[in-house]
């Protein structure tokens, strides 16, 4: 596997981190998400989480503004760094 393929490979998130995403989803409130796009640039959006998906072994969330985000690319939720929740 080449280096650039490895950095784009999905990295499973921890159960604790997924539970935080679920809490926000269940509240059906708008949240602020900061994530890395395909170019690894940070993008910030405010949106509601519509659903979670598993596509070819990678986990995603869809938002009400039409953005699909791979869960392992999210770096901040509601202004808080979420790295401490991810044990992998």
Image (cartoon, rainbow, N blue to C red):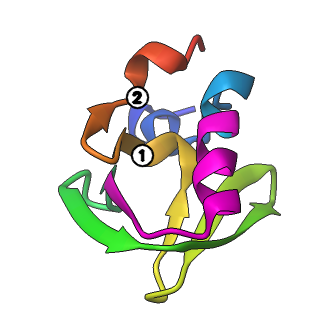
In the image, 56 versus 54, the foreground residue is: 54
| Separation of marks 2 and 1 at Cα, in angstroms | 8 Å
| Of the image marks 2 and 1, the number of the one nearer the N terminus | 1
**Residue 17's quadrant in the figure?**
top right
**Along the horizontal axis of the image, is 17 left or right of 42?**
right
Is disc 1 placed on a helix, strand or loop?
A: strand
Region in magenta: 19-34
In the image, 71 versus 81, the foreground residue is: 81
**Residue 70's quadrant in the figure?**
bottom right
In the image, 83 versus 24, the foreground residue is: 24
Q: Decide: marks 2, 1 in contact (CB < 8 A)? A: yes
**Residue 25's quadrant in the figure?**
bottom right
Mark 2 vs mark 1, foreground winner is 2
**11 shown above or below 86:** below
**Along the horizontal axis of the image, is 16 left or right of 24?**
right
**Residue under circle 1?**
74
**Residue under circle 2?**
82
């Amino acid at each position: 596997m080449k280096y650039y393929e490895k950095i784009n490979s999905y990295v499973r998130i921890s159960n604790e981190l997924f539970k935080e995403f679920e809490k926000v989803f269940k509240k059906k409130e708008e949240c602020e998400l900061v994530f890395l796009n395909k170019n690894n640039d940070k993008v910030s959006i405010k949106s509601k989480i519509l659903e979670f998906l598993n596509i070819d072994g990678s986990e995603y969330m869809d938002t009400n503004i039409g953005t699909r985000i791979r869960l392992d690319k999210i770096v901040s939720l509601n202004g808080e760094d979420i790295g401490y929740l991810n044990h992998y």
